[in-house]
Image: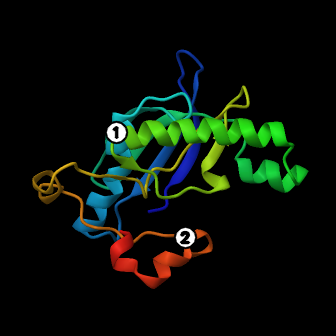
């Protein structure tokens, strides 16, 4: 479900945004339903440590999502550049991300793509979770789960996969 992200600016105000574009070509109807999940989840959340989604546009050939432009770089690039993070930075980033995860869990949303590349810093150095393409909203009851329009997904990035997922992949979805 990779998309391309562009840096754009609103002409009248000069405000900068990130524009994520996902092309429909060569995707089945079922695959496209899953692709929409990211936008549908981001529409439901508003948190200081999660990227904001402002608008979603869909055409015959693509979906466009207008989000915060986060120019502080991803956490992975900062770690790669400076090496080991000082403890106070690590504690701060961890606390912020845990607060974002706690918020998502209260909404029954599971963020399933936690990695340093998906934590991006804003202009003030605050971390924000991005890329909700693998996130999933769980229902509270079996009836709600049965009405879920999204099929089960077996997304994962093997480099970050927990060992128990390899042992029982059907249970871990």
Q: Quadrant of the N terminus?
A: bottom left
Nearer the observer: mark 1 or 2; the answer is 1
> Do we see residue 63 in this rendering?
no
Q: Secondary structure at mark 2?
A: loop
From the top left corner, tell me how far across and down residue 152 is, in percent. 28, 67
From the top left corner, tell me how far across and down residue 137 is, in percent. 31, 50
Question: On the image, which quarter does residue 53 sit in?
Answer: top left
Q: Residues within 10 Å of mark 1 (few under 14, many from 20)?
A: some
Instruction: Name the residue carrying label 1.
Output: 107
Nearer the observer, 7 or 138? 138
Furthest toward the bottom, the residue is: 167
Distance between mark 1 and mark 2 Cα atoms: 24 Å
Indicate which disc, 1 or 2, sits on the residue closer to the N terminus. 1
> Do we see residue 51 in this rendering?
yes
> Is residue 161 positioned above or below 146 on the image?
below
> Is residue 62 positioned above or below 125 on the image?
below
From the top left corner, tell me how far across and down residue 63 is, in percent. 36, 49
38 left or right of 30 in image: right
Question: On the image, which quarter does residue 150 sit in?
Answer: bottom left
Q: Residue at x 27, y 70 (%)?
A: 28
139 left or right of 93 in image: left
Q: Residue at x 63, y 46 (%)?
A: 119
Q: Residue at x 14, y 57 (%)?
A: 142
Counting every numbered tag in the picture gives 2
Q: Residues within 10 Å of mark 2 (few under 14, many from 20)?
A: few
Furthest toward the top, the residue is: 13
Instruction: Name the residue carrying label 2.
Output: 157
């Amino acid at each position: 479900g990779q998309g391309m992200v562009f840096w754009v600016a609103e002409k009248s105000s000069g405000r900068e945004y990130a524009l994520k574009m996902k092309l429909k070509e060569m995707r089945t109807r079922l695959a496209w339903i899953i692709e929409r999940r990211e936008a549908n989840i981001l529409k439901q959340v508003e948190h200081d440590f999660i990227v904001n989604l402002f608008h979603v546009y869909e055409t015959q050939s693509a979906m466009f999502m207008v989000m915060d432009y986060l120019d502080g770089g991803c956490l992975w690039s900062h770690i790669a550049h400076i090496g080991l993070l000082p403890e106070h930075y690590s504690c701060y980033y961890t606390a912020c991300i845990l607060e974002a995860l706690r918020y998502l869990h209260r909404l029954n949303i599971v963020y399933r793509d936690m990695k340093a590349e998906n934590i991006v810093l804003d202009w003030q150095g605050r971390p924000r979770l991005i890329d909700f393409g693998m996130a999933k909203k769980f229902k509270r009851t079996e009836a709600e789960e049965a009405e879920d329009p999204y099929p089960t997904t077996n997304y994962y990035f093997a480099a970050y996969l927990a060992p128990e997922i390899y042992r029982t992949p059907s249970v871990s979805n």
